[in-house]
Amino acid sequence: MSAEHPLILFVGQPARSQSLKQAITPLGWHLYDPQDVLTALGMAVAYLPDIAVIDADAVPELAHEVHFHLSSIAVPIIVLSDDPVWSDRATHTLPTAARESEVMTLIAALAGADHIVPDPFNPF
């Protein structure tokens, strides 16, 4: 993937995934949203995502295991969580209530696509 069209691996609730997918699709970005650990790890190896986003508060049973395995490969990980334990474990964190535009801005910065800054007035 190019910096203009990052590939994102999202681990979290389907509703949040769909909301993020709806926000990024007009930019030509791609999102994969596995619903279990093995699929997430398989997608990480097969698709080599530019960024992984883990909604840790939504899927705590998956978050720790997926983070553990993904942190062993060279992919930036954004963790959405209000739990302070993640501020020590994850390189990039945002609050669970972060708007899609905030998540997109961080994705853009990490993927080198920060010249494609989402509209701050976007309802996502």
Image (spheres, grey):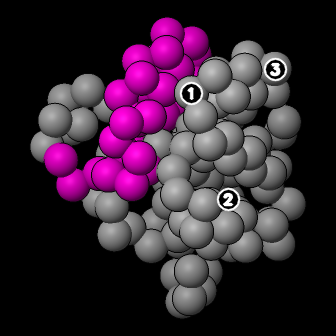
Say left or right for 55 vs 17.
left
Q: Is residue 86 above or below residue 59?
A: above
Residue drawn where x is 80% and y is 67% of the image: 25
* Residue at image mark 3: 46
Q: Position of residue 57 (x, y in %)?
A: 32, 52
Which quadrant of the figure contains the N terminus?
A: top right
Of marks 1 and 3, which one's residue comes earlier in the chain? Answer: 1
Q: Nearer the viewer, residue 57 or 85?
A: 57
* Residue at image mark 1: 37
Determine if the magenta segment contains residue 77: yes
Residue drawn where x is 62% and y is 42% of the image: 35
Q: Which residues are magenta?
A: 55-83
Q: Quick one: SS at disc 1?
A: helix
Q: Position of residue 5 (x, y in %)?
A: 81, 49
Q: Residue type at mark 1?
A: Val
Estimate the spatial distance between the alpha carbons at disc 2 and disc 1, rounded to whole Å.
33 Å
Q: Quadrant of residue 112?
A: top right
Determine if the magenta segment contains residue 65: yes
Residue drawn where x is 24% and y is 37% of the image: 86
Badge 3: residue crowd in 10 Å (few <14, some 14–19, many ≥20)? few
Of marks 3 and 2, which one's residue comes earlier in the chain? Answer: 3
